[in-house]
Image (cartoon, grey):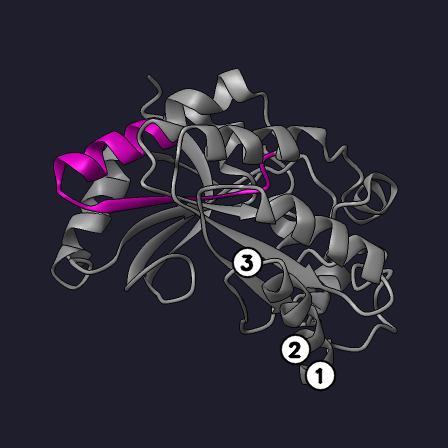
Amino acid sequence: MSGIGRIHSIETFGTVDGPGIRFIVFTQGCPLRCLYCHNPDCRNSHDGKEVTVDYLIAQITKCKSYLRKGGVTVSGGEPLMQPDFVREIFIRCHQMGLHTALDTSGFCLLEVAKPVLEMTDLVLLDIKSYIPDLYYKVTNVSIEPTLAMAKYLSEIGKPTWIRFVLVPHLTDDIENVEKLADFIANLKNVEKLEVLPFHKMGEYKWEQLKLDYELKDTHPASPELVQQTVDIFRSRGVNAMGASGI
């Protein structure tokens, strides 16, 4: 086990990354290069701050009184780039009686992820698109590991929330949404799906990092487009809903 990891930041009163009020750990490092990433400063695995699990547990303990109906979420970045670190955080959280949630893109070898998933109560699985070429355009990686993880989570009955970011003229392609809806409809463990409307609140970080933000001329998804997309998922029997933008 690894008692040391690299994090970007923590949030002590999160309300959107799992049920209830959450203590959120944002890990450092991500293999994806999403066009709409709102935390591009999380990408480089050598940046961020090195911390111990003991340090994080001490911070979580201070907040425990209002986490009773919530818990701890590890997000990123991509948490599964530091699997031993995340697993140990979750083990310690369970010892405290706290619910654990993993926010992941699923881009990870299953054998690496399984020990972490054993200690995870809820998976927040971000599926960026479904058509392989479009997924690659959005993320610069293959969709196959994410689909493999989604199927595995269904096989083991792990409670899962799916997140889909709706970007006009990119991920809103009808065929893309319909195929993703068909795929999710066949999973047995998905409690809900959130359609997250694209926003540009992270654009300033791209400018600060001197990165080319390709979506600078893309407008946020309208409420009408979000509802149309939600309706496609619901037509397949998926418990879908719109959510605050990402």
Q: Which amino acid does the dot numbered 2 rest on? A: Gln
Q: Provide the residue designation for mark 2.
A: 227
Expressed as whole percent of the image width and height from the top left, the position of residue 207 reads 77, 63
**Residue 103 part of the magenta-drawn span:** yes
Is 224 above or below relative to 190? below
Question: Could you classify mark 3 by the number of other residues whose Cα lies within 10 Å: few (under 14), some (14-19), or many (20 or more)?
Answer: many
Magenta residue span: 86-106
Q: Is residue 57 left or right of residue 22?
A: left
Which residue occupies the foreground of this view, 213 or 242?
242
Mark-to-mark CA distance, 1 and 3: 19 Å
**Sequence-wise, which precedes: disc 1 or disc 3?**
1
Question: Could you classify mark 2 by the number of other residues whose Cα lies within 10 Å: few (under 14), some (14-19), or many (20 or more)?
Answer: some
Expressed as whole percent of the image width and height from the top left, the position of residue 30 reads 62, 38
Label 1 vs label 3, nearer the camera: 3
Q: Which amino acid does the dot numbered 1 rest on? A: Glu
Q: Is residue 97 left or right of residue 159?
A: left
Q: Provide the residue designation for mark 3.
A: 238
